[in-house]
Image (cartoon, grey):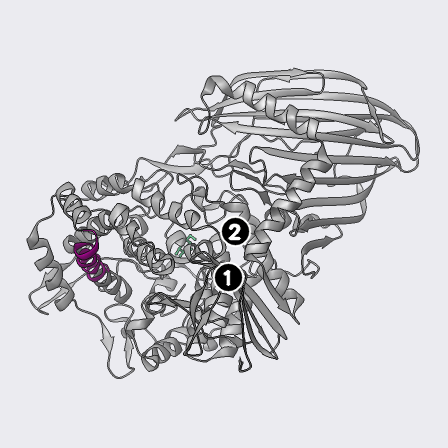
Amino acid sequence: MKQYLEHHPWKIIEPGFDSENQLLSESIFSLGNGYMGQRANFEEEYSGETLQGNYMAGVYYPDKTVVGWWKIGYPEYFAKVLNSTNWLGIDIKVDGQVLDLAKCRVEKFQRILNMKEGYLSREFIAEFSNGNRLKVNACRFISMARPEIAAIRYSVKVLNFEGKLEITPYLDGDVINQDANYGEKFWDQVAGDVNDGRGYLLLKTKKLDFHICTAMDCQIRKNGQELRPDLDKIKNEKYIANKYFLDIQQNDEVTLFKYIASTSSRYYQVGELIDETSCQSRKAAELGFDNLLAEQSAAWGEIWQKSDIKIEGDTAAQQGIRFNIFQLNQTYTGEDERLNIGPKGFTGEKYGGSTYWDTEGFCLPFYLSTADQSVAKNLLLYRYRHLEKAQENAARLGFSGGAALYPMVTMNGEESHNEWEITFEEIHRNGAIAYAIYNYVNYTGDYSYLADYGLEVLIAIARFWAQRVNYSEKKNKYVILGVTGPNEYENNVNNNWYTNRIAVWTLEYTLEVMDYLEQEYPESLAKIKEKVSFKPEEINKWHDIINKMYYPIDEEEGIFLQQDNYLDKEQLLLSELDRGDLPLNQHWSWDRILRSCFLKQADVLQGLYFLEDKYDLETIRRNFRFYEARTVHESSLSPSVHAVLAAKIGDYQKAYEMYLRTSRLDLDNYNNDTEDGCHITSMAGTWLAIVQGFGGLRVRDNTLILNPFLPEKWSSYSFKINYRGALVNIMVGLEGLTIQNESKNDIEIKVYDKEYHLAGDGQLKIKDYKQG
Ligand code: BGC
């Protein structure tokens, strides 16, 4: 835990420079626009500890794997998002001395992430060893309005000397990934050129042939006047630069504008890249920094208009939720169905930028409610397009007949992670992918999705479950052996309750969808059945599994058991743990963790969260009490599920405690690991904690349901949701609830169990509210 950032409703502010915080700040102040993104590295040289990171969505590398013992079924490679051309760099030299904050004396440093308008700024005074002082003011953004454009304004003001200034804006493609398994570099140069004030680099990955072209256009002003100073043009392998030479005097202010365009072969023919990119960076330069920034601010204005959450009475909580919403929007904008949401987004290399079950389990509801319906649909289509690969994956493991096992970690539909207990055993991800289809259709009412895409995926997953179970003669039940549930502090267990439950739920839902299509889309159903060679016996088998699935339970405690024999473990409680042992994964051996009863994250509770309607409140309460007391929340995904369930059982204090833990996880470095990157996918969980937890939002039977409470520490909060074409603003305050329909579309709504019809532009005021 580290608290060094100032609280502010719209800004993240780092007051003062401490090199100890640099890696953390590089993650927290990251920028992105769904298409590309970047850690908050400094423009100028920095010889202190840093993790350089510039990433392009969907551009990855199949790195050779490292494993102890190779096991048949492992994927051949480990995919990783690529650190690509550094377009940020601007070297500064004064009379031969390099500006480097690790070496200069730094004063009045301030770094600000302006979330409202989407830019990053930094100012400081640097003093060189000879006493020369410079004031630097830097500002940059990655355009939301023009996905392939970024811009930097970098000003230096001379405070107390005269001399020679060298400014060198450059593009550097000679970069490495910190997580490269064999220290290899992944890029080759295809072309590069430099001219007066401009240049480009075209690079290509050593495997898979991804091409990225990056171009810069630079302008210099001195004391507000445009200038064409003397310059050297530098062209090395994977590096181009302009080096400007200027004479400077006290009070002079020199400003460099650097306009960047970056494009990839994912969107253009390779032969078009150089022209396209150079054209775009020139156009950006013509438009100018201020105009581009105005566009940026307007684009963010629109995003906030649809997705802002306002909290009054608690600035830290307000900053926390806005930071989460900001980062989610920076990571995924949903225009390209080939893209997805890496657990670290564009803020670091960890998790290889790949797709996990996090998307379906946690992120989908955020995008469903805050963006256009097509955005959530694209997240689903991503998996639909990967269906064949998921079937191949299952076939490699010995399954047949069109069964699909979606990968635990993927870039292109292929599994790209190889730890057997995760790759082979964490099969519950298949359930989350099926559940996402339900979630999407339930929320949007887009039933045609089932006929067009959904059912095919469901059948393939159902077929997997039908083969993955085995029939225990002894128990006279179906069991699922050798799995890892969501709680990764247990591996290779038998009958993980959650996995068994979500498997059966998938079978039930698939049958329900088939019945529905039979009624409403009979032709589509017939086509799908033919396409997948569906056999009537499959239905009988699924029913048999549904009826005879084995679930571990403990009658005495009245709980579902996380897995067989869970209670044989020494039953300790979190409250009995020495605080110094936390986080366990940084203090205990893996062996000790596996033997202990402590949970990394929600497991049985994950199931009760997804399937809450199927259980009464008392059952949920008993299980919540039992497992919450044993959960260390060392996956950032965990507290949000606990927050929603705590709210459901009326434990508002606990819900609030869990919310706080998720909302400032990165800003306060709660799990001591933010320097690797921010926990982007769990940020959606923070949103869930407020909207589904505090707001009690659900959609059931085509009705929007709200059941809000106001946390004791807040005087009010409000959130907006996009629901079936209506934009609904829900405000919860000391005077009660106000629900404003900010659209022309009528909706049906149920608040505290009472039904209302809310007309377009209409408002509903309800005096009651719950406080907790
Ligand atoms: C969690 C997984 C999650 C992954 C990526 C792990 O720590 O246990 O559930 O999918 O992180 O966020």
Most common SS among magenta residues: helix
Left or right of residue 699, residue 718 in this image: right
**Camera-nearest residue between 522 and 201:** 522
Q: Amino acid at mark 2?
A: Leu
Q: In the rendered image of this protein, does residue 89 appear above or below residue 646?
A: above
Say whether residue 46 is visible: no
Left or right of residue 547, residue 753 in this image: right
**Residue at 48% across, 37% down:** 57
Instruction: Give, as a single range, the part of the protein colored magenta.
Output: 506-521
**Residue at 37% across, 79% down:** 621
Residue 398, position as x, y percentages in the image: 16, 44
Tally the numbered discs.
2
Q: Are marks 1 and 2 in contact (CB under 8 Å)?
A: yes
Residue 31, position as x, y percentages in the image: 60, 44
Label 1 beta carbon less than 8 Å to ligand 1: no
Q: Amino acid at mark 1?
A: Trp
Which residue is denoted by mark 1 in the rendering?
Answer: 687
Which residue is denoted by mark 2 in the rendering?
Answer: 328
Quadrant hosting residue 361 = bottom left
